[in-house]
Image (spheres, rainbow, N blue to C red):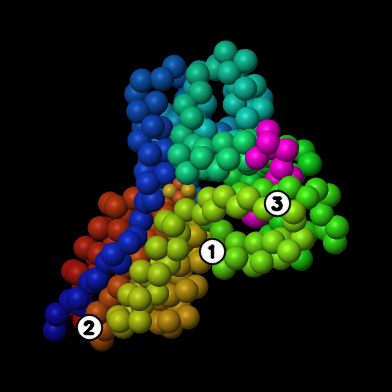
Amino acid sequence: MSAPLVRISTCAGLCSGVERALELTYRAAQEAPPPVNTLGPLIHNPGVISDLKAQGVGMISDPGEADRGTVVLRSHGVPHETKEALLAMGLTVVDATCPFVTSAQEKAARLKAAGYLVVILGEKDHPEVLGLRSYAGDDSLVVESPADLPAQLPAKKVGVVVQTTQSQRRLAELVADLAPRARELLVHNTICSATEQRQAAAIALAAEVECVVVVGGKNSGNTRRLAELCAAQQPCTYHVESAEEINPVWVMGRRTVGITAGASTPPQQIQNVAARIREMEV
Ligand code: SF4
């Protein structure tokens, strides 16, 4: 009897934007004026959130809750009014907005300034989209598909920006609908490839192993989606937040086990899961 062969997805775990946000926050915990709070949960990973808490990093839900110290803005970004209000209150602001999100915000602002009607492809209540909208102007439109567009566009010059986690397929559908209806159409493809790369690598891995373990917060949308995609490929798929949750029965009799992880899962959590599976005799 031997332990199963463990294969870790070639693209798994923290994306560059979340990794940067974590680095900035841990640095703020050491160096920035206390108390240090994140505005909303920094990432959807309970293990990381409790570690941050142990380092003295708390969380507020509303900018009005902070009366002193430091506020960390998470990788999704915030409406520009929020950042301005925090600075006006005399707080130290650590802006951990992902550079890809900042770039999308800047493009939205440039489109608005150049007189375009800005169409944002994204989920209307998502924090990233609320931030983008503050740059795109009150007259901008947020759509999840062409069905959400008005029958008559209110302008002939249309500019598009996209929530970074949307799919290329959805963008193509939107552009196909807008192109014949606008006199001028300027599309900024602001999709970040991190999500699609993780999904493609996970699907490929799931097709080659006898069991898949997906590591990440149960409240992490991108991790849950990875688990769904893997389960469609390999029914023996399990979503865990930590190594302790692994039931030896899952890997019993399996020769190969694949591991993948969402964009908010640190490398140590992935390695802990791999080590636990490797020590199981099957
Ligand atoms: S998924 Fe992409 S845009 Fe979002 S935080 Fe990660 S790197 Fe940045």
Looking at the rendered structure, the secondary structure element under dot 1 is helix
Image-based side of 180 in relation to 94, left or right: right
From the viewer's side, name the closer residue of 125 and 71.
125
Q: Is mark 1 within 8 Å of ligand 1?
A: no
Give the Cα separation between the discs numbered 1 and 3.
Answer: 21 Å
- The crowding category of the residue bearing disc 1, from other C-alpha atoms within 10 Å (few below 14, some 14 to 19, many at least 20), is some
Residue annotated with mark 2: 255
Task: State the mark number for residue 184.
Answer: 3
Q: Quick check: marks 2 and 1 in contact, CB under 8 Å?
A: no
* Residue 46 included in the magenta stretch of the image: no
Q: Which residues are magenta?
A: 111-124
- The crowding category of the residue bearing disc 3, from other C-alpha atoms within 10 Å (few below 14, some 14 to 19, many at least 20), is some
Q: Earlier in the sequence, mark 1 or mark 3?
A: 1
Query: Where, by quadrant of the figure, is residue 76 drawn?
Result: top right
Work out whether 172 lies above or below 89: below
Residue furthest to the top: 90
Q: Nearer the viewer, mark 1 or mark 3?
A: 3
Q: Nearer the viewer, mark 2 or mark 1?
A: 1
